[in-house]
């Protein structure tokens, strides 16, 4: 089963954690990045190419036209859903009416939010299926995978450990290298992937694991599997 990949962005850490926890209880939804500022949000959308970006409409450092331009760029295919209070919903109705984004009230029930996200993803897949029959065989994150091939084995190890929430000192202890060496590796990783912080790096690592998991699930359901023991 291909999960609906979601980037969420909100200026309040507690809200971010709450939304992420609630959505994570749904087996068909996967939060691939939680962002507390505009830069992380934009980078996550650009690099992770999620199905949906659920963004706090009140984030002062994010410009809606820029966000929509990125989401609607060729090959992106991300639907923007703005999370707004009652006043914000009224102000954003024009954008919602012309179809450039959807607006969900912050007082909406979890069931309503989840149903909305599922409906959006269903509509996106129906449209892409008619335009691209090989949907399951093609990875929309091809650019992401290409970027990851630039990383060395050590850099991939560090990327994985960052995604597990380890600090530089903890990573250094695991790999038996100094804190300074970790910083140098991170600098190189950020340059190669064109990102600027650990949040986006962790999200990218998690997303890559999600994609590989989905591929294994498709293989398991559609192809006969050899017994590893018999392959020896």
Image: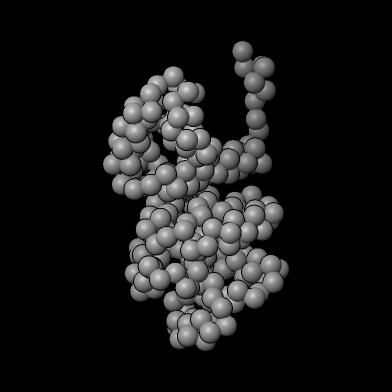
Say if 198 sits above or below 102 in the image.
Answer: above
**Spot occupied by residue 133 in the image (x, y as percentages of width and height):** 50, 56
Residue at the spot 37% in from the left edge and 67% down from the top edge: 61
**Spot occupied by residue 47 in the image (x, y as percentages of width and height):** 39, 51
* The image quarter in which residue 222 lies: top right
- 46 displayed left or right of 90: left
**Spot occupied by residue 198 in the image (x, y as percentages of width and height):** 42, 44
Residue at the spot 50% in from the left edge and 69% down from the top edge: 56
Front residue (pair 186, 141): 186
**Spot occupied by residue 31 in the image (x, y as percentages of width and height):** 56, 53
Q: Residue furthest top?
A: 232
* The image quarter in which residue 111 lies: bottom right
Q: Is residue 129 visible?
A: no
How many numbered discs?
0
**Quadrant where the C terminus is found in the figure:** top right
Say if 142 sits above or below 61 in the image.
Answer: above
Residue at the spot 31% in from the left edge and 37% down from the top edge: 187
- 213 displayed left or right of 190: right
- 184 displayed left or right of 212: left
* The image quarter in which residue 106 lies: bottom right
Q: Is residue 113 visible?
A: yes
Residue at the spot 54% in from the left edge and 37% down from the top edge: 164
Front residue (pair 38, 142): 38
Display coloring: one colour
């Amino acid at each position: 089963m291909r999960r609906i990949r979601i980037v969420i962005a909100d200026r309040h850490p507690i809200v971010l954690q709450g939304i992420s926890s609630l959505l994570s209880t749904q087996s068909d939804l996967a939060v691939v990045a939680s962002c507390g500022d505009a830069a992380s949000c934009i980078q996550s959308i650009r690099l992770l190419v999620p199905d949906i970006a659920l963004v706090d409409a009140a984030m002062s450092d994010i410009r809606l036209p820029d966000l929509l331009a990125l989401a609607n760029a060729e090959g992106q295919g991300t639907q923007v859903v703005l999370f707004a209070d009652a006043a914000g919903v009224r102000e954003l109705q024009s954008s919602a009416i012309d179809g450039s984004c959807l607006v969900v009230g912050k007082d909406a029930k979890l069931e309503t939010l989840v149903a909305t996200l599922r409906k959006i993803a269903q509509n996106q897949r129906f449209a892409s299926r008619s335009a691209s029959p090989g949907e399951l065989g093609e990875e929309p994150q091809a650019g992401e995978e290409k970027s990851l091939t630039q990383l060395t084995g050590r850099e991939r190890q560090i990327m994985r450990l960052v995604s597990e929430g380890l600090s530089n000192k903890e990573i250094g202890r695991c790999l038996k290298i100094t804190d300074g060496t970790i910083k140098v590796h991170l600098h190189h990783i950020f340059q190669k992937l064109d990102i600027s912080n650990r949040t986006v790096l962790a999200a990218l690592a998690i997303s890559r694991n999600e994609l590989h998991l989905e591929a294994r699930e498709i293989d398991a359901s559609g192809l006969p599997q050899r017994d590893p023991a018999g392959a020896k």
